Amino acid sequence: MPADFFADISDQQTPPHYFYFDGSTWKPSATGATVEVISPIDGSIVGTIPMLSSQEMDTALLRATEAQVSWEATPMNKRVGIVHLAADWIRHFQDYLVALLIREVGKSKDEAKGEIARTADLIDYFADEVQSMRGMTLDSDNFPGFEKGRIAMIERVAHGTVLAIAPFNYPVNLTASKIAPALLMGNSVVVKPPTQGGISALHLVRIFEKAGVPPGVISTVTGTGEVVGEHVVSHPMVSMVAFTGNSDTGVAIAGKAAMKPLLFECGGNNPVVVMPDADMVVAAREIIKGAFAYSGQRCTGIKYVLTTPAIREQLVALVLKTMPEMVKMGDPRSPETKLVGPVISEEAAIKIEQAILASVKNGAKCVIGGKRNKAMIEPTVLTNVVPSMPIIAKETFGPVVSFVDVSSFDEAAVIINRSSYGLQASVFTKDEGSGLVFAKKLNVGSVQVNGSPQRGPDHFPFLGVKRSGVGVQGVRYSLEAMSRLRPVVLNKPQ
């Protein structure tokens, strides 16, 4: 670890090696093996993180299990104070964390700054909300056939040790959204950072440690997802798994986790339906923003648009007319760049390019974009797309939006409901009543009327169905998910 964890990263001659946190000490792995974190902007090495052995993972889990009991016994007001202090430290180191996010995952300054500011606010909101969590009592005679004499005292208790697995696209925010509610409800937390984005996540863990989280209560397990996931997800000392990532990985983790409680947010592949009476200017702008922000690398990104051919012709023309104003591909460090920079790696860009080419080969028309330069994918609009084409059959995590023609809006609902994904959908119409009626036909987690899919505000419920998730997130909902009910029944002699 650099002597100063928050050392200047702007002009490093030698990329630093970052350690993992075993619950008490930051140290290198005994294996000596590391993985390089490569900046998607210029291919430079941001740093290296260690690849742990099974024994090192076991040690972190054992410490977490042992420390959790005393942490849950810690008064709530002390846990709240520590978590609030972590939020303050995030704000204190905001400029550093913003610079790190830009380099490590290719965000623009505004996107990175937004993530850090939102993370601090989210942590504070968790710490405030947890203080309103209450237990309850139930009397036995409320139920037919039972007399007075039994009282159930029901409290919320921790699961134990929570395994928190975060993705590359929001490595600070989506790690904090797991750490904060888990700690506040009395759990210990073992963080599995993403490889890309892992350095940012390690800094977040360092902040929680320095804010006063006791030894053993928070730790990290670093390395490739396959190696760490294979060993840790099914580990008997893991009590719960909280995961954000793609659907295929989520399904694999759920299979290994067996009977453990799960809180998952997986792939989105979110559709938009545009009705004939929609404000086309608003719809076009929301489609552009939803499809191309952070180069389309968001679970809430717009991936395809369903409408009739006549509306599609008008809408595509408006999208193409508006794109030069809203989108400019380039280096995310440049103030000239708007929405689209590199995707997370050249490997990821190649997969996106292959999906575009395969869809065009099968009959899709590339109206604009479609070309790749290293990790850069041009903002791309496709028409003549059908649901079976690769570009929307599986979620494409890049700056691509596809237009699918339908003969009716009932057909649009059928296409959405047949998809294996179900995170969010959007419907655009000036008649909000019609929008609400149509929304109720869709088997997705949330429906946005006259807006693009989004995660926030963070106190709203956020969930996916089908292969898009398990459980409900959102401030209070996450706190509830990170705990379980424990009824104790008092039987009074008659």
Image (spheres, rainbow, N blue to C red):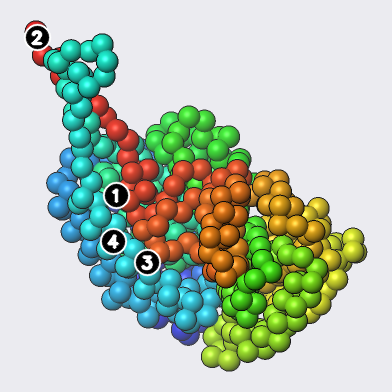
Mark 4 and mark 3: Cα distance apart in space: 10 Å
- The tag earlier along the polypeptide, 3 or 2, is 3
Is residue 105 visible in the rendered structure shown here? yes
Mark 1 and mark 2: Cα distance apart in space: 39 Å
Residue 119, disc: 3
Amino acid type of the residue that numbered disc 1 sits on in the rendered structure: Leu
Which quadrant would residue 204 be assigned to in this image? bottom left
Residue 102, placed above or below residue 391: below
Is the C-beta separation of discs 3 and 2 under 8 Å? no
Q: Which residue occupies 54% across, 85% down?
A: 333
Residue 384, placed above or below residue 138: below
- The tag earlier along the polypeptide, 2 or 4, is 4
How many neighbours does mark 3 have within 10 angstroms: few (below 14), some (14-19), or many (20 or more)? many
Amino acid type of the residue that numbered disc 3 sits on in the rendered structure: Thr
Question: Which quadrant would the C terminus be assigned to in this image?
Answer: top left
Front: mark 4 or 3: 4
Mark 2 and mark 4: Cα distance apart in space: 44 Å
- The tag earlier along the polypeptide, 4 or 3, is 3
Question: Disc 1 designates what residue?
Answer: 183
